[in-house]
Amino acid sequence: MRTIFHLITTINRGGAENQLLVLASEQIKSGFDVHVAYLKGEPELKADFELSGITVHDDLATTAVIFQPLRFRKLLNKRNVIVHAHLPRAELVAFSTLAKFKFFASRHNAEPFFPGAPKNLSNLLSKMVEIRSIKIIAISNAVKDFLLARGEIARRVKVDVVHYGYNRRFTGVLSQENIDRTNINWGTISRLTDQKDIPTMLRAFSKFREVAPGSTLSILGAGPLEVELKALTKSIKLDQSVQFLGRSSRIYDFLAGLDVFILTSKYEGFGMVLLEAMDAGIPIVASGNSAIPEVLGNNFPGLCTTGDSNDFYQKIIDLSNTAYRKRILELQKIQLNIFRADLMNQKISEIYEL
């Protein structure tokens, strides 16, 4: 039986981590012996991995950073092992083991390998991983284009694009073609960081409340800007209609209460939450940048100008039209079929055989 060893920075709940769970579960179905090792943090998804038959290794998370490559090398005690690293720190640990194995790395973000570091250093570290790897797997064309344009990957042929895969959970039971125009529940699932541009969302919602005063905005997620964003919400007198709900795994319950899903990000490597909203039958309004048009479709009517709160406001006003809302939901249903988990697994398996 072929062994695949996934190495990732954490297995906390997040886009890359949830997607690894989908991929590893599909690989188990395909007959692989699948292992996951993580480098730090609480193993929030450990039970989910193990329920799918995946072996989870805690060893590295309790090992000092400097010794993690050596510890990982000891875990790789089988021949013919495929190592697949996810996120920069994990890529560097895999690179540093100096062991012989087939090495692949997935890039999940359209951002520097080493954010905050000088460009030359970030590019150098990225290219070190590139040289050691057989393939770099970008989760979207937007990520691939970013890596090449910034010079973090030297050879275009070294990068393949494999979109995230998705197993349907909601079966469209939440779809609503009609809504109460005066009481619309907005919602998003988002880390509270600068990338997500929550202030644009709040400004759009403030304007919307002028025409639909009973509306609410719920934000599922946490992050370093929470205090700042709550202060902004209070300063524009939205604190009674905006809820900051923190982190939760109860995605279905959250989506069930929404009329509109909004994503104001300045960029996304992919945007897994968009697939969840599509699956739940919630119409989406989102920034038209980076990978978002790849996920929703280049001509999707709900794409907005990045940072333009008036555009977001108008697109959500448009959703009060029943025919327009029905069209949006139909387009989302068609688009979701592109991102099947079994197709993702098949494409990655083909890359492993190179």
Image (cartoon, helix red, strand yellow):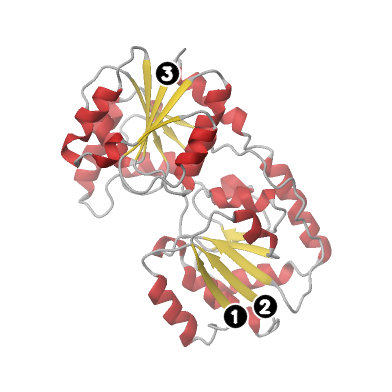
Task: Report whether residue 142 is seen.
Answer: no
* Nearest to N terminus: mark 1 or mark 2: 2
- Helix, strand or loop under label 3: strand
* Nearest to N terminus: mark 2 or mark 3: 3
Up the image or down, 316 lies above or below 95; here it is below
Q: CA distance from mark 1 to mark 2?
A: 7 Å
Q: Quadrant of residue 343?
A: top right
- Helix, strand or loop under label 1: loop
* Nearest to N terminus: mark 1 or mark 3: 3
Q: Using a 10 Å C-alpha cutoff, classify the residue at mark 1 as few (fewer than 14 neighbours), some (14 to 19) or many (20 or more).
A: some
Q: Residue at x 63, y 75 (%)?
A: 216
Q: CA distance from mark 1 to mark 3?
A: 51 Å
Residue at mark 2: 215
**x and y, in percent, of residue 245 in the image:** 52, 68
Q: Quadrant of residue 334?
A: top right
- Helix, strand or loop under label 2: loop
Residue at mark 1: 241
Q: Residue at x 26, y 28 (%)?
A: 72
Checking the image for residue 153, the label placed there is none
Q: Using a 10 Å C-alpha cutoff, classify the residue at mark 2 as few (fewer than 14 neighbours), some (14 to 19) or many (20 or more).
A: many
Up the image or down, 97 lies above or below 86; here it is above
Left or right of 327? Residue 71 is left
Residue at mark 3: 3
